[in-house]
Amino acid sequence: MTYVTSVIAIVICGGAGALLGWALVSALGWTGPGAALAMVVTGMVAAMLLYAAGVALGRILRLHK
């Protein structure tokens, strides 16, 4: 995988994680600093899991070594 595709994948996974964190906090109706921390933690965990799943899928499909 080239550096460019890695950066694109990181940006996409980060955006998806941020949206998931925002959706969770909004659905719970939380506000304030506690909500911001919950959103950050949820978003970062989701982004990490999405990226790891993408790398694993790429290796399974032998798209990169």
Image (tube, helix red, strand yellow):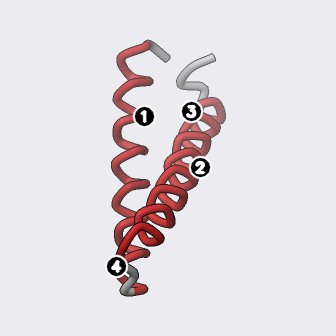
Q: Determine whether the residue tagged by mark 3 lies in a helix, strand or loop.
A: helix
Q: Are marks 4 and 1 in contact (CB under 8 Å)?
A: no
Q: Residues within 10 Å of mark 4 (few under 14, many from 20)?
A: few
Q: Which residue is mark 2?
A: 49
* Camera-side mark, 1 or 3: 1
Upstream in sequence: badge 4 or badge 2? 4
Note whether 60 is above or below 64 in the view shown. below
Which residue is more in the foreground, 24 or 8?
24
- Which circle marks residue 10 in the picture? 1
Q: CA distance from mark 2 to mark 1?
A: 11 Å
Which quarter of the picture shows residue 7?
top left
- Which circle marks residue 58 in the picture? 3
Which quarter of the picture shows residue 52?
top right
Q: The disc labelled 3 sits on which kind of residue? A: Gly
**In this view, which residue lies farthest toward the front?**
33
Q: Which residue is mark 4?
A: 26
Upstream in sequence: badge 3 or badge 4? 4
